Structure formats: structure tokens, C-alpha cells
Amino acid sequence: MKKFIVLSIVLLMIAGFAITSSAVGDQSGGMIFPLAAVMLLDGPWVILDEAMDPGDLFTGGPWTWDSDFTVKFTITDLYVVTDIFKVYDWSIFVIETPYLPDWDVLMIPDPYDDPPWTDDPDTALASGYFSSAVLYLGPGSHSITIEDIHIPPVSAGGNPFPDGTVAFKAELYSLEVDIDIKPGSDPNSINLKSKGVVPVAILGSAIFDVTDVDVTTLMFGPGNAEPVHDLTDSIVYADHLQDVNLDGYLDLVCHFKTQELGLVAGSTEATLSGETYDGVIVYGTDSVNIVGK
């Protein structure tokens, strides 16, 4: 069966993917994670906080999932600038967050308390003051373990701050791409009574190769219309690779039956969606102008 992905139902699908967590152990007498903690892909951030002495090390997890799609895993410190986190997948090291100078060395203005901290991971990521990393994990089964090396800054004339906090989340990775409905036409007028087809170009670029798209997953409009032509046929497919905007990059032109688009009077835009062979969800939206009675 073809795996058709529609942006409008992605959020409904997300609830079907769950991550489970269990404790691996504490190597320094510090943090012990609760057993069987559950987190949904595309769910909220998970925040773990524990008092730690300088040089403490804890290992938490694993957090596991099995997904047909690429997953974006983000991890960030929240409290101490210099904590370093190592991430392992099936016990194999995959990434380490960078070492950052102490907050007092950076002479950070005081947007936070002293030392700088926040309980909002998005704020931490945007500030650039906290050690963080992003990891993209392909389709399949993954088992994530997190190791925290606690390197607390020292306040002026005081003792090291005994706290270690980490936040992480895993979300289905999607990529917004440029599309052009009825290339060369402006506005993109569509007569809902037409018995013909509507061409839609997926635009390639220096960072997006249209040949990475799995053509069997493509759908367009609220009606989830499928391409009219058999793009799995190599000759037909080659015929639909064109440079419609003359930017030097190949574009993929697909055609969809007007009667299958699901557009209605008053529709102002339509979305094309699909996925790459690597399991990345792709989607693009362009304007439409509904004409006729």
C-alpha cells in the first residue's frame, strides 16, 4: 500500500508514535530517572533537573521509538552554561553538545537570574548561551541515551552552583519547499468545473533536489489528489523534470485532475505534500484563484 502523507493529517498521526524511557543508572550517586516515562513524538519538551556536584556524571535513558519518518532530536541545557551532553543511539556515540564559556566569563547581561537560567527550552536555544545540539535520525528504530557531564560555573567569591538541567524533544522532521501552481501563470486561476488537469511544479534549489522525492507519496489539495501520470515510469518521470523557473535547478512538474483537488469557491491556496526517500516529510503551498460560477 502506498504511504501517502498529507500535511493536514500529520498532527493526527503524531499521536501514534510514542517514546518510552527507563533508567540506565547513575554513575555518581546523583540522578535516577523514573521508569516508564512516556513522551510522544512532536510532544512537549521533556525537562530533567537534579542537584549535582562539580564533575558529576549521570546517564539517563534509553528513550526509544520506531518511526517511518526522519526524527529531529533537539537537546539543550537550561541552567548552567557549561554542562556538556553526550547523546548515544543504541549505545553508539552520535553527538556531543559544545563546551561554552562560563556565564560570568561571558559577562552576560542579566536576562535571567544569577546564574543565567530559564525554564523555557525555546528561550534557551534562542539565546545562544546554553549548550545545545540538533540530531537528525532516519526512519527505523532508535534508542537514545543521554549523558550529562556537570561543569558548573563559580559565582564571584562563592561556591560552584550544584545544579544540572537538560531538556530534549523528538519531532517528526518536515521540510517546507517551494511549489508553483500552474507555472508561468499569475494569478493561478482554476475553474472548478474544468475536466482538465492542474500542473504543479516542485521547485528544486541548491539545498533541495527534487529527485529525492518519492513520487508515490505525492498528493495535492484538500481532496488529496494523486498525480495523473505514472511518475514511477522512468521515461514518463524524465519527461516531467524541467527547469520551469530557469534558475539552473531541475523542477518536478506533476499534474492533478481538477475534479479531484477538493477546492471550493473561496479557496485561496492549496498545498502539495509527500516525503523523500529518506523519510523527510515535504510540503509546499501556493496561491489559487477560483474562477467561474
Image (spheres, grey):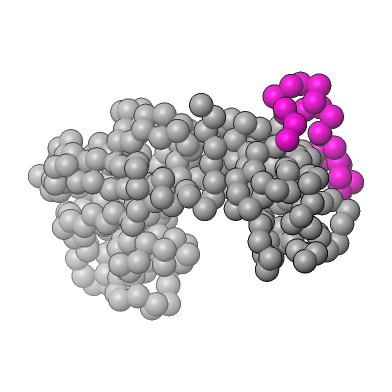
Q: Which residues are magenta?
A: 228-250
Horizontal side of residue 122 vs 26, given as left or right: right
Please give the count of numbered marks on the rendered protein. 0
- The one nearer the camera, 22 or 190, is 190
Can you say which quadrant of the picture contains the C terminus? bottom right
- Hey, which quadrant is residue 71 in on the image? top left
Q: Is residue 247 above or below residue 127?
A: above
Which residue occupies 30% across, 76% down? Answer: 113
Horizontal side of residue 43 vs 217, given as left or right: left
- The one nearer the camera, 269 or 290, is 290
Which residue occupies 68% across, 65% down? Answer: 265
Res. 253 visible in picture: yes
Q: Is residue 268 above or below residue 36?
A: below
Horizontal side of residue 259 vs 116, given as left or right: right
Which residue occupies 14% across, 46% down? Answer: 34
Which residue occupies 19% across, 65% down? Answer: 159
- Residue 235 counted in the magenta span: yes
Residue 119 position within the rendered picture, expressed as x and y whole percent measured from the top left: 30, 67
Residue 141 position within the rendered picture, expressed as x and y whole percent measured from the top left: 37, 29
Q: Is residue 111 above or below residue 152?
A: below
- Residue 145 counted in the magenta span: no
Res. 134 visible in picture: no
Horizontal side of residue 79 vs 97, given as left or right: left
Q: Is residue 51 above or below residue 25?
A: below
